[in-house]
Image (cartoon, rainbow, N blue to C red):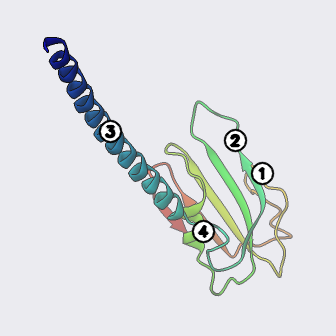
Amino acid sequence: MRYASGVLFELNKANKMNKVNKKRLIWFGFIIVIVIAVIVSDSSLLTNAERIRGGFTETAFKRNENNSGPVIRLYAVKVDSPLVADFEGYGNSMPHTEHGTTKIFYFDAAKGSPDKISLETPYYDTSKYEAISIFQKNAVGKVSEK
């Protein structure tokens, strides 16, 4: 009898442990589902350049090779519909480094845009191309448009 009650006690203890492990597994699964839901919803909030009105197409890009100082990014972008284009929305969707500058030159697609851009001013051939707008985000995140 003593042996049987000891076995029953062990079985009861094992059954309680299984219930505890089952609860832990359920909570762990619940947390994983929440994390995945947050990642998916956060990634869907990112703006896609194709969704921004105006028909933007990047034609040239240049980045300085300085990895120890401020990062400078220059873009030449042609715009299909400049009258309805969201220049600031497109500019804010582009990569920006905390201690750097991002500068985007917008060109009317009907008049053409440069296919090469330089880090030196003038950044492109100003005799051939004229920017319709310039977006700049500086090191502290301040946005300016011309």
Residue 13, image x, y percentages: 21, 25
Secondary element type, mark 3 = helix
Residue type at mark 1?
Ser
Q: Is residue 146 visible?
A: no
Q: Quadrant of residue 129?
A: bottom right
Horizontal side of residue 56 vs 8, given as left or right: right
Mark 1 or mark 4: which comes first in sequence?
A: 4
Q: Amino acid at mark 3?
A: Lys
Under circle 4, the secondary element is helix
Q: Indicate which label's residue lies in the foreground, 4 or 2.
A: 4
Picture residue at 57% right of the left edge, 50% below the top: 101
Q: Which label was assigned to residue 90?
A: 4
Q: Is residue 8 left or right of residue 92?
A: left
- N-terminal-most mark, 2 or 1: 2
Q: Between tags 2 and 3, which lies in front?
A: 3
* Disc number lying in front (2 or 1): 2
Residue 123 in view (yes/no): yes
Q: Which residue is mark 3?
A: 22
- Residue bearing mark 2: 64
User: Image quadrant of residue 47?
Assistant: bottom right
Q: Closer to the N terminus: mark 2 or mark 3?
A: 3
The residue sitting at the bottom extreme is 83
